[in-house]
Image (cartoon, rainbow, N blue to C red):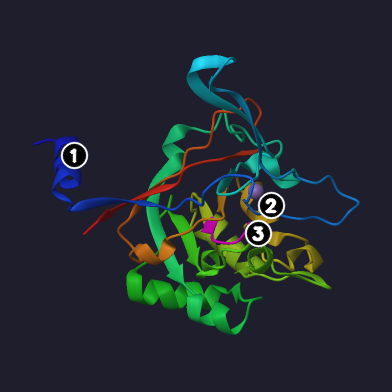
Amino acid sequence: MTLLTQFVEGLDSGRVKIVDLTQPLGPETPVIGLPPQFGASPGVTMEVISKFDDKGPGWYWNVIHMGEHTGTHFDAPIHWITGKDLPDNRCDTLPVRRFVGPACVIDVSREVAANEDFLLMPAHVAAWEKEHGKIPTGAWVLLRTDWSKRTDAASFLNVKADGPHSPGFHQTTSELLAKDRDVTGVGVETVGTDAGQAGTFTPPFPNHTIMHGAGKLGLASLRNLDQLPATGAVVIAAPLKIVNGSGSPLRVLAIVES
Ligand code: MN
Protein backbone atom coordinates (compact mmCIF):
# COMPACT_ATOMS: atom_id res chain seq x y z
CA MET A 1 0.00 0.00 0.00
CA THR A 2 1.30 3.46 -0.83
CA LEU A 3 1.33 6.33 1.65
CA LEU A 4 -1.52 8.00 -0.19
CA THR A 5 -3.75 4.93 -0.43
CA GLN A 6 -3.18 4.48 3.33
CA PHE A 7 -4.12 8.10 3.81
CA VAL A 8 -7.37 7.74 1.86
CA GLU A 9 -8.17 4.54 3.72
CA GLY A 10 -7.59 6.44 6.97
CA LEU A 11 -10.07 9.10 5.86
CA ASP A 12 -12.64 6.47 4.88
CA SER A 13 -12.28 4.57 8.15
CA GLY A 14 -12.35 7.74 10.28
CA ARG A 15 -8.86 7.16 11.67
CA VAL A 16 -7.79 10.31 9.84
CA LYS A 17 -9.95 13.40 10.30
CA ILE A 18 -10.02 16.81 8.67
CA VAL A 19 -10.50 19.71 11.09
CA ASP A 20 -11.67 23.02 9.64
CA LEU A 21 -9.65 25.88 11.17
CA THR A 22 -11.63 28.53 9.26
CA GLN A 23 -14.17 31.19 10.31
CA PRO A 24 -17.26 31.71 8.12
CA LEU A 25 -16.57 34.50 5.60
CA GLY A 26 -19.35 37.02 5.01
CA PRO A 27 -20.66 40.52 5.75
CA GLU A 28 -20.54 39.76 9.50
CA THR A 29 -16.82 38.89 9.45
CA PRO A 30 -14.91 41.25 11.78
CA VAL A 31 -12.10 43.26 10.15
CA ILE A 32 -9.08 44.86 11.79
CA GLY A 33 -9.35 48.61 12.46
CA LEU A 34 -6.36 50.95 12.07
CA PRO A 35 -5.87 54.54 13.27
CA PRO A 36 -7.77 56.96 10.97
CA GLN A 37 -4.66 58.29 9.18
CA PHE A 38 -4.15 54.86 7.57
CA GLY A 39 -6.11 53.21 4.77
CA ALA A 40 -8.92 50.99 6.02
CA SER A 41 -9.67 47.46 4.91
CA PRO A 42 -13.36 47.13 4.02
CA GLY A 43 -15.59 44.39 5.33
CA VAL A 44 -17.06 41.79 3.03
CA THR A 45 -19.78 42.83 0.63
CA MET A 46 -21.60 40.45 -1.68
CA GLU A 47 -23.78 41.29 -4.64
CA VAL A 48 -25.88 38.74 -6.50
CA ILE A 49 -25.12 38.48 -10.22
CA SER A 50 -28.05 36.18 -10.76
CA LYS A 51 -30.14 33.77 -8.74
CA PHE A 52 -32.42 31.67 -10.94
CA ASP A 53 -33.92 34.87 -12.30
CA ASP A 54 -33.94 36.94 -15.52
CA LYS A 55 -30.20 37.59 -15.16
CA GLY A 56 -29.49 33.86 -14.99
CA PRO A 57 -32.52 31.56 -15.04
CA GLY A 58 -30.56 28.40 -14.28
CA TRP A 59 -27.69 29.60 -12.12
CA TYR A 60 -26.74 31.43 -8.91
CA TRP A 61 -23.52 33.39 -8.37
CA ASN A 62 -22.21 36.45 -6.52
CA VAL A 63 -19.61 39.19 -6.76
CA ILE A 64 -17.49 39.39 -3.59
CA HIS A 65 -15.53 42.44 -2.43
CA MET A 66 -13.13 42.55 0.50
CA GLY A 67 -9.58 43.32 1.55
CA GLU A 68 -6.99 40.57 1.10
CA HIS A 69 -6.63 40.35 4.90
CA THR A 70 -10.22 39.52 5.80
CA GLY A 71 -11.50 36.75 8.04
CA THR A 72 -9.38 33.63 8.22
CA HIS A 73 -6.53 34.76 6.02
CA PHE A 74 -2.94 34.31 4.95
CA ASP A 75 -0.12 36.88 5.29
CA ALA A 76 2.63 36.65 2.64
CA PRO A 77 6.09 38.13 3.31
CA ILE A 78 5.42 40.99 0.85
CA HIS A 79 2.67 42.19 3.23
CA TRP A 80 5.36 43.86 5.35
CA ILE A 81 8.06 46.37 4.41
CA THR A 82 10.71 44.06 5.88
CA GLY A 83 9.72 41.29 3.44
CA LYS A 84 8.94 43.37 0.37
CA ASP A 85 12.14 42.61 -1.55
CA LEU A 86 12.51 38.92 -0.71
CA PRO A 87 12.32 36.37 -3.55
CA ASP A 88 9.09 34.38 -3.97
CA ASN A 89 7.38 36.54 -1.35
CA ARG A 90 3.84 36.87 -2.70
CA CYS A 91 0.72 34.76 -3.03
CA ASP A 92 1.36 33.77 -6.64
CA THR A 93 5.09 33.03 -6.30
CA LEU A 94 5.42 31.30 -2.93
CA PRO A 95 6.39 27.65 -3.48
CA VAL A 96 3.32 25.51 -2.76
CA ARG A 97 5.37 23.10 -0.67
CA ARG A 98 5.49 25.77 2.00
CA PHE A 99 1.73 25.73 2.47
CA VAL A 100 1.77 22.24 4.02
CA GLY A 101 3.53 21.48 7.28
CA PRO A 102 3.36 19.93 10.73
CA ALA A 103 1.42 21.86 13.36
CA CYS A 104 2.82 22.69 16.78
CA VAL A 105 -0.07 23.93 18.92
CA ILE A 106 0.93 25.98 21.94
CA ASP A 107 -2.01 26.21 24.33
CA VAL A 108 -2.03 29.45 26.32
CA SER A 109 -5.81 29.67 26.69
CA ARG A 110 -5.54 29.70 30.49
CA GLU A 111 -2.99 32.55 30.49
CA VAL A 112 -5.09 34.55 28.01
CA ALA A 113 -8.24 34.09 30.10
CA ALA A 114 -6.36 35.88 32.90
CA ASN A 115 -4.62 38.48 30.70
CA GLU A 116 -6.00 39.55 27.34
CA ASP A 117 -2.68 41.25 26.48
CA PHE A 118 -0.72 38.03 27.06
CA LEU A 119 2.49 37.75 25.02
CA LEU A 120 4.12 34.41 24.29
CA MET A 121 7.68 34.46 25.65
CA PRO A 122 10.65 32.24 24.74
CA ALA A 123 10.25 30.60 28.17
CA HIS A 124 6.76 29.41 27.15
CA VAL A 125 8.24 27.88 24.00
CA ALA A 126 10.97 26.21 26.07
CA ALA A 127 8.37 24.74 28.44
CA TRP A 128 6.31 23.48 25.49
CA GLU A 129 9.40 21.91 23.88
CA LYS A 130 10.35 20.19 27.13
CA GLU A 131 7.03 18.38 27.01
CA HIS A 132 6.54 17.89 23.26
CA GLY A 133 9.98 18.04 21.67
CA LYS A 134 11.74 20.69 19.62
CA ILE A 135 9.63 22.63 17.13
CA PRO A 136 10.72 21.21 13.77
CA THR A 137 11.92 23.22 10.79
CA GLY A 138 8.98 24.06 8.57
CA ALA A 139 6.36 23.85 11.32
CA TRP A 140 3.23 25.93 11.50
CA VAL A 141 3.27 27.21 15.10
CA LEU A 142 -0.34 27.76 16.14
CA LEU A 143 -1.10 29.85 19.21
CA ARG A 144 -4.18 28.46 20.91
CA THR A 145 -5.77 31.24 22.93
CA ASP A 146 -9.49 30.32 22.63
CA TRP A 147 -9.90 33.90 21.37
CA SER A 148 -12.03 32.52 18.52
CA LYS A 149 -14.72 31.67 21.08
CA ARG A 150 -15.43 35.41 21.14
CA THR A 151 -17.96 35.11 18.33
CA ASP A 152 -19.31 38.67 18.43
CA ALA A 153 -17.24 41.31 16.61
CA ALA A 154 -16.97 43.70 19.58
CA SER A 155 -15.41 41.23 21.99
CA PHE A 156 -13.31 39.64 19.21
CA LEU A 157 -11.74 42.98 18.21
CA ASN A 158 -11.84 44.15 21.87
CA VAL A 159 -11.17 47.81 21.13
CA LYS A 160 -10.89 50.07 24.18
CA ALA A 161 -10.11 53.79 24.62
CA ASP A 162 -6.39 53.06 24.16
CA GLY A 163 -6.84 50.71 21.20
CA PRO A 164 -7.34 46.99 20.69
CA HIS A 165 -6.37 44.41 23.31
CA SER A 166 -5.61 40.82 22.30
CA PRO A 167 -2.77 38.33 22.82
CA GLY A 168 0.28 37.78 20.62
CA PHE A 169 4.01 37.14 20.52
CA HIS A 170 6.84 38.93 22.26
CA GLN A 171 9.46 40.16 19.79
CA THR A 172 12.07 37.76 21.20
CA THR A 173 9.72 34.83 20.60
CA SER A 174 9.14 35.84 16.98
CA GLU A 175 12.92 35.98 16.56
CA LEU A 176 13.34 32.54 18.12
CA LEU A 177 10.67 30.98 15.91
CA ALA A 178 11.71 32.68 12.66
CA LYS A 179 15.48 32.45 12.93
CA ASP A 180 16.39 29.67 15.33
CA ARG A 181 13.51 27.25 14.71
CA ASP A 182 13.09 28.23 11.04
CA VAL A 183 9.31 27.68 11.15
CA THR A 184 7.06 28.08 8.11
CA GLY A 185 5.00 30.61 9.99
CA VAL A 186 2.66 31.28 12.86
CA GLY A 187 -1.10 31.05 13.12
CA VAL A 188 -3.34 32.81 15.62
CA GLU A 189 -7.01 32.98 16.57
CA THR A 190 -7.01 36.79 16.74
CA VAL A 191 -7.62 39.24 13.87
CA GLY A 192 -3.88 39.64 13.15
CA THR A 193 -0.62 37.90 14.02
CA ASP A 194 0.49 40.71 16.32
CA ALA A 195 -0.95 41.47 19.74
CA GLY A 196 -3.73 44.08 19.84
CA GLN A 197 -1.45 46.65 21.47
CA ALA A 198 1.51 45.90 19.15
CA GLY A 199 1.16 49.22 17.33
CA THR A 200 2.58 50.80 20.49
CA PHE A 201 5.53 48.37 20.76
CA THR A 202 9.11 49.09 19.67
CA PRO A 203 9.36 48.18 16.84
CA PRO A 204 5.63 48.44 16.11
CA PHE A 205 4.04 45.15 15.06
CA PRO A 206 7.16 43.10 15.91
CA ASN A 207 5.75 39.77 14.81
CA HIS A 208 4.95 41.01 11.30
CA THR A 209 8.28 42.85 11.16
CA ILE A 210 10.37 39.85 12.18
CA MET A 211 8.42 37.00 10.59
CA HIS A 212 7.93 38.59 7.18
CA GLY A 213 11.48 39.97 7.20
CA ALA A 214 12.61 36.36 7.52
CA GLY A 215 10.29 35.26 4.70
CA LYS A 216 7.88 33.55 7.06
CA LEU A 217 4.11 33.27 6.64
CA GLY A 218 1.15 34.19 8.83
CA LEU A 219 -2.37 32.87 9.45
CA ALA A 220 -4.94 34.97 11.30
CA SER A 221 -8.47 34.45 12.63
CA LEU A 222 -8.13 30.67 12.95
CA ARG A 223 -10.60 28.66 15.00
CA ASN A 224 -10.98 25.10 16.34
CA LEU A 225 -7.36 24.99 17.51
CA ASP A 226 -8.79 23.28 20.62
CA GLN A 227 -9.52 20.26 18.39
CA LEU A 228 -5.84 19.75 17.54
CA PRO A 229 -3.20 17.77 19.43
CA ALA A 230 -0.07 19.63 20.51
CA THR A 231 1.85 17.78 17.81
CA GLY A 232 0.95 15.33 15.06
CA ALA A 233 -1.49 17.35 12.95
CA VAL A 234 -0.62 18.55 9.45
CA VAL A 235 -1.87 21.96 8.31
CA ILE A 236 -2.73 22.86 4.73
CA ALA A 237 -2.97 26.63 4.26
CA ALA A 238 -2.84 27.63 0.59
CA PRO A 239 -3.76 31.22 -0.29
CA LEU A 240 -5.52 32.18 -3.51
CA LYS A 241 -2.98 32.64 -6.30
CA ILE A 242 -3.56 36.39 -6.46
CA VAL A 243 -1.00 38.04 -8.76
CA ASN A 244 1.20 40.22 -6.53
CA GLY A 245 -1.12 39.35 -3.64
CA SER A 246 -0.03 40.30 -0.12
CA GLY A 247 -2.37 37.76 1.41
CA SER A 248 -5.73 36.18 0.90
CA PRO A 249 -8.74 34.72 2.65
CA LEU A 250 -8.38 30.94 2.61
CA ARG A 251 -9.75 27.68 3.93
CA VAL A 252 -7.29 26.30 6.47
CA LEU A 253 -7.48 22.55 7.04
CA ALA A 254 -5.72 20.37 9.60
CA ILE A 255 -5.28 16.64 9.08
CA VAL A 256 -5.45 14.77 12.38
CA GLU A 257 -4.92 11.11 13.21
CA SER A 258 -7.25 9.75 15.88
MN1 MN B 1 -3.06 39.95 7.66
Kindly identify the residue that appears in the image at 51 percent across and 67 percent down: 149
Please tell me how crowded label 1 is: few (under 14), some (14-19), or many (20+) other residues with Cα within 10 Å. Answer: few
The residue singled out by tag 2 in the image is: 31
Name the residue nearer the viewer: 176 or 145.
145
Give the residue type at disc 2: Val
Q: Secondary structure at mark 2?
A: loop
> Alpha-carbon neighbours of circle 3 within 10 Å: few (<14), some, or many (≥20)?
many
Q: Inspect the magenta stretch and tell me whether residue 176 lies in it.
A: no
Q: Position of residue 133 (x, y in %)?
A: 34, 68
Quarter the C terminus occupies: bottom left
Question: Where 194 sits versus 54, above or below?
Answer: below
Instruction: Give whichever of discs 3 and 1 has the lower sequence position.
Output: 1
The residue stretch that appears in magenta:
187-192
Q: Magenta part mainly helix, strand or loop? A: loop
Please identify, in this view, whether the residue under mark 2 or under mark 3 is nearer the observer: 2
Point out residue 31 in the picture as x, y percentages from the top left corner: 69, 52
| Residue picked out by circle 3 | 207
Give x and y (percent) for residue 132: 34, 70
For mark 3, give the secondary structure. helix
Q: Disc 2 versus disc 3: distance between alpha carbons?
A: 19 Å
As for residue 189 lying within the magenta part, the answer is yes
Q: Nearer the viewer, residue 44 or 165?
A: 44
Q: Is mark 1 within 8 Å of ligand 1?
A: no
| Residues under numbered marks 2 and 3 in contact, where contact means CB atoms less than 8 Å apart | no
User: Mark 3: which amino acid?
Assistant: Asn
Which label sits on residue 8?
1
Q: Position of residue 106 (x, y in %)?
A: 45, 69
Q: Is residue 216 visible?
A: no
Q: Which dot, 2 or 1, sits closer to the camera?
A: 2
Residue at the image position 40 percent from the left and 66 percent from the top? 226
Residue at the outermost bottom position:
114
